[in-house]
Amino acid sequence: MREMKLDYRSLVTLQRRSFRNGSWRRLPLVDRALFRCALWVARVRGRILNLKLLVRVLGIVLRLLDTPRMCIWRAGRARAEELTQRFEDRGLFQWAPRVRGWLADRSYVFCLGLEVSCNG
């Protein structure tokens, strides 16, 4: 994973990106205000140094980077893991070994995620 810098330029870029993909409006008002505050601190001081603020802002950043596609992918992966465990317990893979391949296929996992609703 690439190192994430919380300086003014990267926070502004992230905010613009979240405006475009709609994740900004899904944030609670308090989180938007805290992000704007962190943006001001980063502009004045160059970057965020306070560990408490840094942790809170990183939580907001992760929610801003979350796209609908990633939400679908995460839900599909969770469903595929659940089905894999269920099928192993029942011995389904012994008489239908191709099903294990389906549950590992990226497009099939994405389709499984479409069945599960995402928070949004």
Image (cartoon, rainbow, N blue to C red):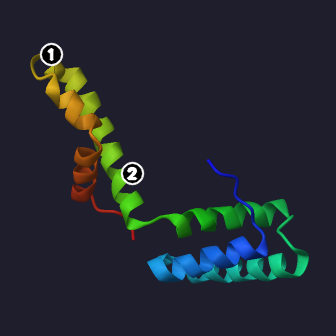
Q: Looking at the picture, which amino acid does disc 1 mark? A: Gln
Q: Is residue 48 visible?
A: yes
**Quarter placement of the C terminus:** bottom left
Residue 11: percent from the left, percent from the top? 69, 74
Dot 1: element: helix
Q: Residue at x 39, y 51 (%)?
A: 74
Q: Looking at the picture, which amino acid does disc 2 mark? A: Arg
Query: In which quarter of the view is residue 7 placed?
Result: bottom right
Residue 107: percent from the left, percent from the top? 25, 48
Residue at the farthest right position: 45
Q: Is residue 48 above or below residue 28?
A: above
Residue 105: percent from the left, percent from the top? 26, 39
Dot 2: element: helix
Q: Is residue 25 visible?
A: no
Indicate left or right for 44 with 69 as reference: right
Q: Which residue is mark 2?
A: 74
Q: Residues within 10 Å of mark 2 (few under 14, many from 20)?
A: some
Q: Residues within 10 Å of mark 1 (few under 14, many from 20)?
A: few
Q: Residue at x 82, y 68 (%)?
A: 48
Query: In which quarter of the view is residue 77 placed?
Result: top left
> Label 1 to label 2, Cα distance in Å?
27 Å
Name which of mark 1 and mark 2 comes first in the sequence. Answer: 2
Indicate left or right for 49 with 77 as reference: right
Q: Residue at x 17, y 21 (%)?
A: 93
Asked if labels 2 and 1 touch by Cβ distance under 8 angstroms, the answer is: no
